[in-house]
Image: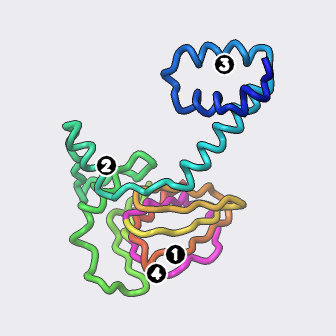
Amino acid sequence: MDIKSYIDEGNLEQYCFELDNVSLGNEIAALRLGHPEIGQELNRIELSIEELAKTHAITPSLQLKGRIMAALGIAEEVLDLNHLPPTSKYSNYESWLKAVEHLIPAAPFDDFFAHVLQQNEQMAQTLVITKLNVPDEVHDVVAESFFILEGTCTCTVGHEVFTLNAGDYLAIPLHTNHDIRIDSPYVIAILQHQFV
């Protein structure tokens, strides 16, 4: 069999899009054993499909998660401002936004607004609305994290860059330089400090 012709005929692309085609799958699995170029080409095709998906990805609406959870019959988490849990990557930003919405001033917002939600020996949580970038800083005794409720920002932490949108959570390691650039007109977030 001429493997180059087999590849050029589009059989591998067909396989990638027809994963339920058992006979084609068996044929390619057998060919792959004796022809490493089949595996190499499959890897190239899969990476191309992944890049295509990323290029044409559509950010879902902010309400989509709530609609899915409601359709599944999962109740929305209701937060009590007097007993707030720590924020984490598992926190529900819609529940947090609903809990603090009465504290958010009417637009247009000032350049910076902060309202302390809770503060004790272990932790401080502050509702922040800002249009201002945060210059480079580092913390030695406070573990800082951000939980974005609205807007978009870019956070540089050490040598890594993170783009944060509504629902995103980012914990900043101790002794690590970081800064924040506001990419939307403003950002609403929960700033959390845990004292170590």
Please state the extent of the stretch shown in magenta in the rendering: 128-149
Separation of marks 2 and 3 at Cα, in angstroms: 38 Å
Let me know if residue 116 is in the magenta part.
no
Mark nearest the camera among 4 and 2 is 2
Element type where label 3 sits in the image = helix
Mark 4 residue type:
Lys
Between disc 1 and disc 3, whose residue precedes? 3
When the figure is inspected, residue 106 is found, relative to residue 166, above or below; the finding is below
Residue with the mark numbered 3:
28
| Mark 2, residue position | 65
Residue 192 visible in the snapshot: no
Mark 1 Cα shell of 10 Å, populated few (<14), some (14-19), many (≥20): some
**Where 120 falls versus 21 (above or below)?**
below
Residue type of the residue flagged with mark 1: Ile
Q: Secondary structure at mark 2?
A: helix
What amino acid type is highlighted by mark number 3?
Ile
